[in-house]
Image (tube, rainbow, N blue to C red):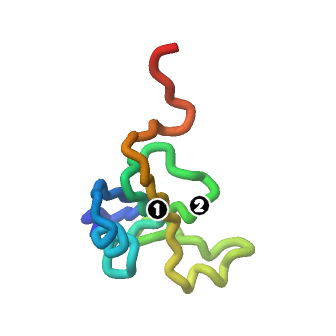
Amino acid sequence: HNDVRQGLSSAIFTRSLHYSEQFLSHAGSDCGIANVNIGTSGAEIGGAFGGEKETGGGRESGSDAWKAYMRRQTNTINWTTELPLAQGIKFGD
C-alpha cells in the first residue's frame, strides 16, 4: 500500500504478471490511479483521480455520486520496454 494519507496515484515497475495483477487487485494499491511500468506524473484527468483516503471530500458531489460507494481505480499497464514521458514532455528535436 501507498503509505501516505492522500492516496492519489501509485506505480509499480515489474516484469512479473503476477506482481502486476496483485498490485492492481484489492490487496494492492489503494490509490485512485495505479500504473504498471509507467510513472505517476501526468495522471489522466479523465480517470478516477482523488477521493481515496484523506484526500478532499471524495467523489460524492456530482452525477457519479453512486460510485462513491464503490472502489474505483484507473489502471495503466505499459507492456513495452520503453518508459514513456508524461503527456507533453519532449526532449531533443
Residue under the point 40% across and 49% down: 38
Q: Is residue 18 left or right of residue 32?
A: left
Q: Which mark is residue 76?
A: none
Name the residue type under label 1: Ile
Name the residue type under label 2: Gly
Image spot of residue 44 (x, y percent):
56, 52
Residue under the point 71% across and 72% down: 62
**Above/below status of 87 relative to 74:** above
Q: Is residue 52 left or right of residue 3?
A: right
Which of 51/39 is in front? 39
Q: CA distance from mark 1 to mark 2?
A: 7 Å
- The residue under label 1 is 33
Quarter of the N terminus within the rendering: bottom left
Image spot of residue 26 (x, y percent):
38, 81
Q: Earlier in the sequence, mark 1 or mark 2?
A: 1
Q: Pointer 1 and pointer 2: residues touching (CB < 8 Å)? A: yes
